Image (cartoon, grey):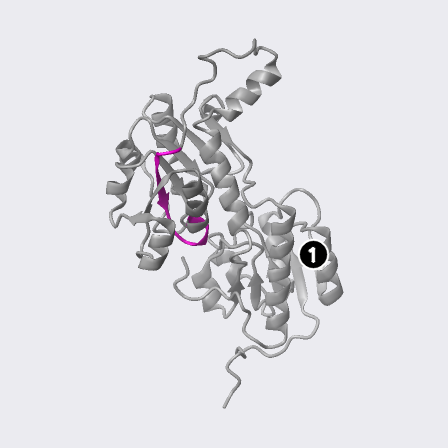
Amino acid sequence: MPEMTRAANPRVPNPKVWVTRELPAAVMDRMEQLFHTSIHRGPAALTRDELAAAMAECDVLVPTVTDEIDADLIAGAGPALKLIANFGAGVNHIDLKAARARGIIVTNTPGVLTEDTADMTMALILSVPRRLAEGEKLVRSGEWKGWTPGGMLGHRIGGKALGILGMGRIGQAVARRARAFGLTIHYHNRHRLPKVVEAELQAQWHPNLDEMLSAIDILTIHTPRNPDSEGLIDAGRIALLRPHVYVINTSRGGIVDEAALIAALEGGRLAGAGLDVWQHEPQIDPRLLALPNVVMTPHMGSATFEGRLATGEKVITNIRMWADGHRPPDQVLEGWA
């Protein structure tokens, strides 16, 4: 009987690995010890032509979220490319259907960034209603004249209703934190959580997204970006949110219609927003920059030393398992979302 852990690929001793961005030094050093590794060093992402050239000559590509690997690039890849070992959990930047058609395995790094992203989400949930960014800027400006009873008033979050869009690992980690701050938990998910998990989180499922949006005080987004979620929070759904609501997004920028969000913020139809991701990243609409009730961070939700090292370790494990002829533990399967 064949060994069930083995994939169809043969062993590939010393695979040629192309890494598209500088990773933590310890990760890059380990990759260079284990594999025949080429690394694109420097702050900028590879150009499309450079990415195509790398894919033409390697056995394994290690991309990041900044690399858009579409069907045309995959079609032009060299015959040796059999593994795309993504550095990160999200794979919406990779055409999975085209990869499968070429017999290319795609892996990701789930789980390692859950707690870091949940921490950042909770920081934004606190920062926007309490006006922390505005207060920090006021102190730095030298214009703060001291404490007054009416100075820098914000809103408490205890007792408010938090709506979580996407109740996977990160959504559940946010819910656990939010409960400790006295928020009530509402969620919309494609599938309802087991009752034991709902009980643990004291979370109420809303099968209808629109109904949830009209009932909450804070919305936080934790769904992957895919064809179903692209533009999910559009002008119509933003209009369902009441004027005192805050919108938090640490997931992917394209899930929210940014123009509609800006219009609502400028028109006083939303209280504020906390954004770590952008629709046209790294470009940021200057209208957002001008809004004092928007806290903005540079896609740093998962940016911890510990998280980056753990991500790199998962990438290395996936490559080693594949090179030994086994199925990688984090292979992205059909129907991933």
Q: Is residue 320 left or right of residue 174?
A: right
Q: Is residue 258 left or right of residue 32?
A: left
Q: Is residue 10 left or right of residue 248?
A: right
Q: Residue furthest top?
A: 145
Query: Which region is colored magenta?
Result: 158-171
Look at the image and say whether residue 293 sits in the magenta stretch: no
Residue closer to the observer: 114 or 4: 114
Residue 28 figure quarter: bottom right
Q: Position of residue 68 (x, y in %)?
A: 52, 50
Residue at screen point 26% across, 37% down: 215
Residue at screen point 59% across, 77% down: 325
Q: Position of residue 16 (x, y in %)?
A: 68, 66
Residue at screen point 44% across, 18% down: 153
Q: Position of residue 96 (x, y in %)?
A: 45, 61
Residue 239 figure quarter: top left
- Report which residue position mark 1 lands on: 27
- Which quadrant holds the C terminus? bottom left
Question: Tag 1: residue type?
Answer: Val
Residue 75 against residue 149 in the figure, above or below:
below
Determine the secondary structure under disc 1. helix
Q: Is residue 74 visible?
A: yes
Q: Position of residue 24 (x, y in %)?
A: 69, 51
Q: Residue furthest bottom?
A: 1
Residue closer to the observer: 137 or 225: 137
Residue at screen point 54% across, 61% down: 76
Residue closer to the observer: 313 or 332: 313
Q: Is residue 277 visible?
A: no
**Pointer 1 local density, CA inside 10 Å: few below 14, some 14–19, many at least 20:** some
Look at the image and say whether residue 169 sits in the magenta stretch: yes
